[in-house]
Amino acid sequence: MKRKNDDFLRPRGKSLLTIVVGGFYGDEGKGKIVGCLATKRQYDYVVRAGGGPQAGHTVTDGKKVTQIPSGFIAPDAKLLIGRGTVINPDVVLREIETYGVGGRIGIDYGCTIIEGPKHIEQERELVERIGSVGTGTGPARVDRLLRKAKIAKDIKALRPYLVDVAAEVNRAINLDKRILVEGVQGYCLSLLNYKFYPYVTSQDTTASQFAVDVGIGPMAIDEVVVVYKAYVSRVGPGPMRFEWAKEQRDARGTEERGTVSGRLRRLGDFDKNLAKESLSRNTGTHAAITCIDRLFKGNAGVKEFDQLTKEAKDFIEKLNTLFKKASKYYRGIAAISTGPNLEDTILLV
Ligand code: GTP
Ligand code: MG
């Protein structure tokens, strides 16, 4: 029988898979952007990729998470934690209880486990040398590399939640579901990035790594949203261009502290070259810009692009032009954040 090409080539399904990543040093406000996308775009699944309890996100109204997905804020979303995330069982169980998500969360059998005081103690040297947060994530990954770490399936207390996240995610893709993958930290903290090493984290922090962390291949990715703060912030030591002196920080009234560490963050001007680079290395399809209200007065809580001040509009237009030049995959600005809560957002997708 003669077959036509069409018999073999089928159109792509209707599933949507979006990965959210940080474009600078982490803490760009990914938690809030994920919360906003998860609620407004109604994803069926929100999947946490990478990091460990050192990666804190503030979603809205002061609601903070370090282990469960920031997308918990969308009440109907199924929540998953991929195998690339390092788990402290006490912390994850506490967050599951605090936010009452026990009935809709799955943790991968293969997640690496932080063993209490041992791994935290082992990280002390790194805390002093490169400013690690000190939650034991790095040492747990070292043990994984040496094939002696415990994994989630060894921990009795996690048993009610254990699933094969890769299997769930791929099944969901085949069923045309909508999936939001939330990355952690930011481009400049990638372990393998030679420009920032050794002031980096214990894994790569770009979209490709987060795909591995949840068990999917590159062809499953439809969108990569790179999140940028309107200025740069960094919680630890290491290279950072255009850093503000104390007087500049005070003049702007933009003091910030780390979500997990509580340390005062270093702040600086938006770094255009760095932003172009991180968009390109993530093959970003969209950018999201946060804390516009903190950089330009008069924009707090704005919900329509037209209502932004001219200064803020110009800033965003220029970034959009810059990103178009950085990558042929770039399609546009997905969201502009004008305040800490979910409703303070101009959502453009
Ligand atoms: P990720 O680690 O990227 O998820 O970021 P984070 O949640 O750690 O963000 P960060 O701690 O840097 O955010 C600092 C605070 O700013 C948090 O309390 C957020 O709720 C808040 N925030 C997020 N977006 C905005 C915004 O657009 N404007 C203002 N004023 N605050 C924001
Ligand atoms: Mg953070």
Image (cartoon, helix red, strand yellow):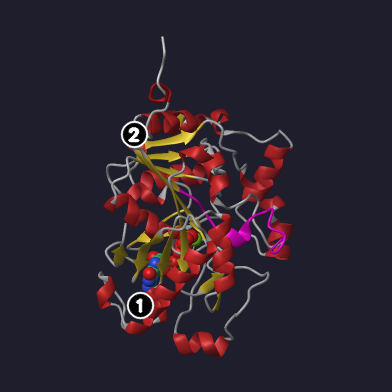
**Main secondary-structure element of the magenta-colored stretch:** loop
Q: For residue 78, which quarter of the picture? A: top left
Is 40 on the left-hand or right-hand side of 312? left
Q: Is residue 41 above or below residue 23?
A: above
Is 239 on the left-hand or right-hand side of 34? right
Amino acid type at mark 2 = Asp
Amino acid type at mark 1 = Lys
Q: Determine the secondary structure under disc 2.
A: loop
**Lower position in the chain sequence, tag 1 or tag 2:** 2
The magenta-colored residue range is 182-197
Residue that label 1 marks: 313
Give me the residue at 64% from left, 47% from top: 117
Image spot of residue 120 (x, y percent): 65, 51
Mark 1–mark 2 CB contact (< 8 Å):
no
Q: Is residue 251 above or below residue 30?
A: below
Q: Is residue 191 magenta?
A: yes
